[in-house]
Image (cartoon, grey):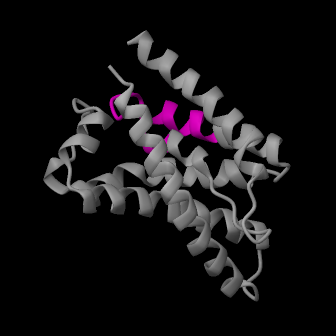
Amino acid sequence: MSSIYINIFLRFVMLILIQGLVFNKFDLNGIYDPYVSVVFVLIYPVKTNRIFFLIISFFFGLSLDFFSNTLGINAAAFTIIAFLKPNIMNFVFGNFYDPHGVKMIKNYIIESTIYQKILYLFLIIFIHHFFMFLLESFSIDQLYLVFKKTIFSSLLSLIFCFTFIYLLVQNER
């Protein structure tokens, strides 16, 4: 069980550094950034304590906020997607979803269809980006810009996250 928490800690540090040092500098048209840090929530083990998951997701987002100087926006967005993750998994995977956590994320990735994988990734990424950009603008007048940034950044993040998750799952024991 402690190896799970060591893996969580290593992913925490690795994804913070990759997002903060590499992908925050990656600008497409000056406003669209891929957020591969969402991978932390996407592949977080299902069989751990849910309260611990919410707390660690909050601190993960807060750590990203220190790197990006965004004043808690990432912390809020990561807490929201961590809270919604079980509901999204139940929606996407249906009867295949195991709320008790016997199955690992690797099983979901290997045994599900490509449509389920893409839908799962896209929903988590889209919700994260929508709340992050909504809190960033904090204005109803800029709702069009929020949707535009959300869609383009989500598609860009989806490509990078999909690739990153497959690299991590291939190397998992």
Where's residue 170, x and y in %?
35, 31
Most extreme residue toward the left is 95
77 w.r.t. 131: above or below = above
Residue pictured at 49% horizontal, 57% vertical = 159
Where's residue 53, x and y in %?
49, 35
Q: Quadrant of residue 118?
A: bottom left
The verdict on residue 56 being magenta is yes
Task: Describe residue 136's horizontal placement relative to residue 2 as left or right.
Answer: right
Where's residue 155, x and y in %?
52, 67
Judge by depth and name the residue closer to the eye, 19 or 138: 19
The verdict on residue 88 being magenta is no
Q: Which range of residues does the magenta coloring cover? A: 41-59
Task: Inspect this view and state whether residue 88 appears.
Answer: yes
Judge by depth and name the residue closer to the eye, 64 or 34: 34
Most extreme residue toward the top is 2
Task: Inspect this view and state whether residue 45 appears.
Answer: no
Q: How many marks?
A: 0
27 w.r.t. 97: above or below = below
Residue pictured at 51% horizontal, 25% vertical = 8
Q: Which quarter of the figure is the C terminus placed in? A: top left
Residue pictured at 56% horizontal, 58% vertical = 157
